[in-house]
Image (tube, grey):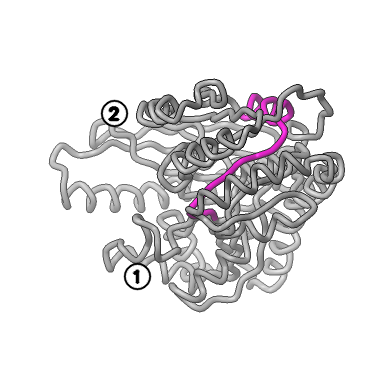
Amino acid sequence: MKNYTLWLPSWYPNRKDAFDGDFIERHAIAVSKQTKVILLFVTKDEQLKSNEVEIEKNITGNLMVYKVYYGKTRWGGMFEKLHSFIKYVGLQKKIYRQIINENGIPDIVHVHVAMKAGLLARYLKKRFQIPFVVTEHWSGYSPGLKQSIYKANWFQRLLNKKILEKATFFLPVSDNLGKTVTKYFTAINYHVVPNVVNTEVFYFAPIDIKKFRFIHPSSMNDYKNPEGLLEACKLVKEKGYDFELLMVGNQPEKLISLAVQLDLSEQVSFMPTVSYAEIAQLMQQSSALLMFSLFETQSCVVLEALCCGLPVVGTRVGGIPELIDKENGLLVESENIPALAKAMMQMMDNYKAYSPQLISEKATALFNYKTVAKQYTDIYNKFIEQAPVVE
């Protein structure tokens, strides 16, 4: 590459939510270790006035990040949505012009999550023939979700489809996501490039664990089905098993109350959201990962647990079956609480059959920064060579 790759994420860690799109941030860090990346992220900050715009610029090695915040109007409703859309598109183009004035034209554009960031990429390809690829992480292409693309307004669905159809290449994080998009949304060729793990943080660290500990780090929202986890724990306890479950993340009062109602106070403990590094340490102090998700595109948590050498008890949904086999875990059907309880007991009974070190080695080889970044840069170079010269 002679210049740089322009990254346009729809989600990215920001002043409101430091974990929003952190998996995209890790992708950006990984690729920046091999080539120059300039990232442009635009988002609304409802604390700002309608005419206010704030720009944060940060440079770390080969990664230059622009975070652009704009305010909301006082009117709300459809006027606010239209104002926000126009402001978003205008700021994307404005800061892009500033970027090219200082750094030249990008070799290729990389969109993460098609809407709304892909709008600028589509424009640049149409106007200047700059190729763009789209990495998709969003589970909203699954028809069964409450918040899916199929329930969005017709204009958003149209724009989303146009972005994907005009992409030079489509890069879902799992084969399941690629098939889902092709089957339900729009037919498009794709190549899977997975999520990435910082294996300098998530790695196998042998430790003597006195009591079998399951760990469940998540947002604890409905799609993670934490209530179902507790119901399964109740069944396992009734069978006389000695274990504990550490639930890390949001702590809804109703979930804590349910644990008390199920008489699980000695088995289940809760911990608030912690840092990326602290999650790694907690995993290294646990025996197995426990997930009961209704939907997953791939699940960064599963990748991280595997890199730490943890076998996984999870559900046969989304991209998870692509990650789990008899050597590194057990899968059950989603919402089948008795099956989950049975798998938990099976995991404890046969735990010595798993090799944490081997689990870690295999996952680390697949999901480390260097391996995933090379997949991206190989794709960049392929399409840069094919692209017309842009002056």
Q: Is residue 351 visible?
A: yes
Q: Quadrant of residue 200?
A: top right
Q: Looking at the picture, does residue 329 appear above or below residue 175?
A: above
Residue 211 is tagged as none
Residue tagged by mark 2? 47
> What is the spatial separation of the Cα atoms under label 1 and label 2, in whole angstroms?
30 Å
Mark 2 burial class by Cα count in 10 Å: few <14, some 14-19, many 20+: few
Mark 1: amino acid: Leu
100, 48: nearer the viewer: 48
Q: Which of pointers 1 and 2 lies earlier in the amino acid sequence?
A: 2
Mark 1 burial class by Cα count in 10 Å: few <14, some 14-19, many 20+: few
Q: Residue furthest left?
A: 75
Residue name at image x 70 percent, y 46 percent: 346
Magenta residues, as a range?
276-296
Q: Residue 360's x, y, as percent?
A: 81, 42
Residue tagged by mark 1? 158
Q: Looking at the picture, does residue 89 appear above or below residue 382?
A: above
Quadrant (top left/top right/bottom left/bottom right) for the C terminus: bottom right
Q: SS of the residue at dot 2?
A: loop
Mark 2: amino acid: Gln
Q: SS of the residue at dot 1?
A: helix
